[in-house]
């Protein structure tokens, strides 16, 4: 019986039908979706921290308004994704618990510090740029709630990316010191942005199955190449130099060849030993603990209301 259910399920995937929360699905499909969607949600929430750090120091009111809106969007993406994840039968409390105990991962990129205002430019340009490349194919992912969430998320990410690029453009055309700040931010965020798209395909344990289930529509290496090919001409427009001496146009492949990525650094960060891992977790766990009285008060209020209704 379950084998025929599985066959029907695979045929639905084959026909590009969306799988919905109450549909039958293999347990492993459910589990790997909870893993990826929750990691994605956690990344949005932890991803608010490096930029949140600069809201009070934005150089003008207009910059502040834009940055504030961007960080609020990230909160919205996180909540949207947690809701999509909950449709797979896991509670919000369990998801938070997994993040706070280190059981669930979040994107490596948010374990680097945002040191100067130029980092707000580099994050929007590169990190949101990489996020869009990764997320546009996910608008076509097989699980309905995830696919629909991605449509709105991608529209907002596109504003975020432009916001960042415009900060870079302004700095790159500013004083010598401003241009140096922009170059320095590019130097620090370039390699982590490439790593953000995940390990190389031969080291990626989930890609093969996730491609079959159409959870992933492109592999990590395909997305990375696409990101590089799209971003190098943008660096030219800015007049900045990508910090990779081996970067070179390959006429035959119609793509850029690029230098070696430091995968040891990536795995160190993923395992919790990046420059900001401890601080990021401390901020999240602290926020959860400081919010306890609010949750308790809300529950007590709801219970009182319910009791009054039952009288
Ligand atoms: N960081 O077999 P694979 C954003 C883990 S965008 C940490 O290749 P998969 C917007 C992976 O989980 C950022 N861990 O895994 C924003 C697995 O470990 P596990 C979030 C990583 O899932 C912008 C192991 O390595 N975007 O937040 C990373 O097939 C600016 C083996 O890897 C998404 O999450 C990493 N970078 O492919 C917000 C998009 N890469 O789980 C604020 C959705 C891999 O077995 C400011 N996710 N690992 O313990 C995906 O597309 C995929 O999950 C990948 C990884 C491509 C990230």
Image (spheres, rainbow, N blue to C red):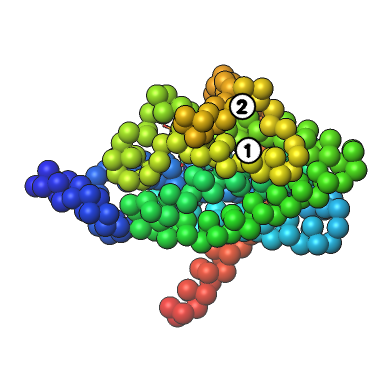
Mark 2 residue element: loop
10 Å neighbourhood of mark 1: few (<14), some, or many (≥20)?
Answer: some
Q: Is residue 172 visible?
A: yes
Residue 112's spot in the image, x, y percent? 68, 34
Name the residue: 46% across, 79% down: 309
Extreme front residue here?
A: 251
Mark 1 → mark 2, Cα distance in angstroms = 9 Å
Q: Residue 129 at what x, y percent from top left?
A: 60, 46
**Snapshot quadrant of residue 207:** top left
Vertical placement of residue 64 versus 288, above or below = below
Percent x, y of residue 280: 66, 38
Q: Residue at x 67, y 54 (%)?
A: 162
Circle 1 SS class: helix
* Quarter of the figure with residue 113: top right
In the rendered structure, the answer to whether residue 53 lies left or right of residue 95 reads: right
Q: Is residue 282 above or below residue 262?
A: below
Q: Is residue 61 or residue 296 the one in the foreground?
A: 61
Residue position marked by numbered label 1 in the rendering: 232
Please determine whether, in this image, residue 158 is positioned above or below residue 104.
below
Q: Are marks 1 and 2 in contact (CB under 8 Å)?
A: yes
Q: Position of residue 40 (x, y in %)?
A: 50, 45
**Residue linked to disc 2:** 247
In the image: residue 9, left or right of residue 261: left
Q: Residues within 10 Å of mark 2 (few under 14, many from 20)?
A: some
């Amino acid at each position: 019986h379950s084998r025929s259910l599985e066959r029907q399920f695979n045929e639905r995937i084959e026909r590009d039908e969306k799988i919905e929360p109450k549909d039958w699905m293999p347990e492993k499909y459910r589990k790997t979706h909870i893993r990826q969607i929750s990691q994605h949600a956690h990344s949005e929430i932890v991803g608010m921290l490096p930029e949140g750090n600069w809201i009070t120091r934005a150089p003008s009111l207009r910059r502040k308004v834009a940055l504030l809106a961007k960080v609020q969007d990230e909160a919205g993406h996180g909540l949207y994704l947690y809701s999509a994840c909950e449709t797979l039968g896991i509670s919000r409390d369990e998801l938070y618990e997994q993040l706070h105990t280190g059981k669930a991962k979040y994107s490596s990129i948010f374990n680097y510090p945002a040191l100067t205002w130029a980092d707000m430019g580099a994050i929007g340009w590169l990190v949101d740029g990489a996020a869009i490349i990764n997320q546009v194919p996910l608008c076509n992912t097989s699980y309905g709630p995830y696919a629909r969430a991605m449509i709105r998320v991608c529209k907002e990410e596109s504003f975020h990316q432009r916001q960042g690029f415009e900060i870079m453009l302004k700095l790159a055309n500013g004083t010598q010191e401003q241009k140096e700040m922009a170059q320095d931010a590019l130097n620090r965020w370039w390699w982590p942005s490439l790593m953000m798209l995940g390990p190389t395909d031969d080291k990626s344990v989930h890609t093969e199955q996730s491609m079959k289930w159409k959870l992933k529509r492109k592999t990590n290496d395909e997305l990375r190449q696409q990101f590089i090919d799209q971003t190098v001409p943008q660096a030219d427009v800015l007049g900045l130099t990508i910090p990779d001496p081996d970067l070179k146009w390959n006429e035959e492949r119609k793509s850029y060849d690029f230098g070696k990525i430091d995968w040891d650094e990536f795995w160190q960060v993923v395992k919790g030993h990046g420059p900001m891992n401890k601080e990021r977790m401390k901020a999240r766990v602290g926020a959860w603990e400081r919010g306890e009285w609010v949750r308790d008060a809300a529950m007590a209020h709801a219970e009182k209301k319910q009791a009054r209704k039952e009288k």
